Image: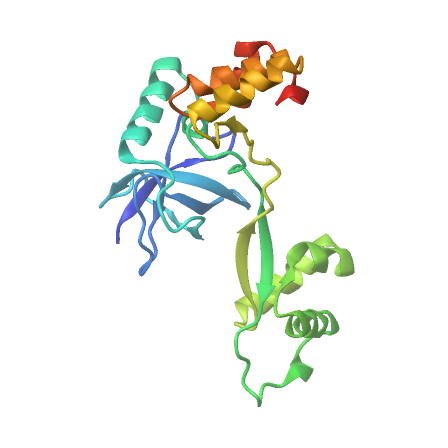
Amino acid sequence: MHYAEVSVNSPIAQRMAFSYAIPSGLNIEVGQAVWVPFGDKLLQGIVVELSRYPSVEETREIAGVIEPDPLLSPVHVLLARWISEHYLSPIFDAVALMLPPGFERRALTFISIPSIPDDFDLSSLTREQRHVLESVEMQGKVSLKELEKALGKKKAQTVVSQLVKRGLAVRSYELERVRVKPKTVPYLRLTVTDSEAQQEAAGLRQRGAIKQARLLDFLARQTQPLPSAEVRKGVDCPTSAV
């Protein structure tokens, strides 16, 4: 069995990485984002090192991968570890500087059911267990949060654990929706030739549209598209002129 040193997204972790066993059949690389059990929670982590031997005697297994490909290169991981050591910061805080926006999201737990034998005796289940199985069967999969609303938090977690232990249910994990919207930056470029732009600029000056004329002259001198804000600043014109 191989092991991974994982930087865990928890304030308790501080400057430590934690050893986790890599389950058979799970391919893990340095820089990969993974789910790991941490206390009684399932948290995000980044693999910072692979090893044949764990740094502690007893380890728990990695629960699964968040993304199939590494989010960070080995060079980025080395840089994050250097930042952590040099500035005495938690490793994950250093790692987070290089992660894509919106990565630090909560894990949502979903419940699904495997194929249950036709001759399985449903009467051996409690009313709550049957309720959970029926809900999951109708929807394909159900979030644990939805079951907690129906049964209460403790009861839902207990029932799900009982079903998982008996092989009648399976837990899976997904990241909650990204709350960070991507930032878009508009760029400007000419869609006509420089000479056509200059002719149009001359006509604009005759009509008194001086700022728009300056805008066309400015763009005609550029060799590549420029951010709209930079163009407006360069010719001192408002958004309406663009």
* Residue 229 visible in the snapshot: no
Rendered location of residue 204, percent (x, y): 61, 18
Image height check: is 125 above or below 192? below
**Residue placed most toward the observer, 183 or 8:** 183
Quadrant holding the N terminus: bottom left
| Residue 194 falls left or right of residue 135 | left
**Residue placed most toward the observer, 199 or 16:** 199
Query: Looking at the rendering, which quadrant does residue 55 occupy?
Result: top left
Rendered location of residue 203, percent (x, y): 59, 19
Colouring rule applied to residues: rainbow
Report the residue at 55% width, 11% height from top. 235
Total number of numbered labels? 0
Image height check: is 131 above or below 39? below
Question: Residue reaching furthest left?
Answer: 52
Rendered location of residue 139, percent (x, y): 66, 70
**Residue placed most toward the observer, 27 or 54:** 27
**Residue placed most toward the observer, 213 or 183:** 213
Report the residue at 58% width, 85% height from top. 120
Quadrant holding the C terminus: top right
Question: Residue reaching furthest bottom?
Answer: 119
Image height check: is 117 above or below 141? below
Query: Looking at the rendering, which quadrant does residue 124 occupy?
Result: bottom right
| Residue 197 falls left or right of residue 162 | left
Query: Looking at the rendering, which quadrant does residue 56 occupy?
Result: top left
| Residue 131 falls left or right of residue 181 | right
Rendered location of residue 103, percent (x, y): 51, 38
* Residue 49 visible in the snapshot: yes
Report the residue at 53% width, 36% height from top. 104
Image height check: is 161 above or below 87? below
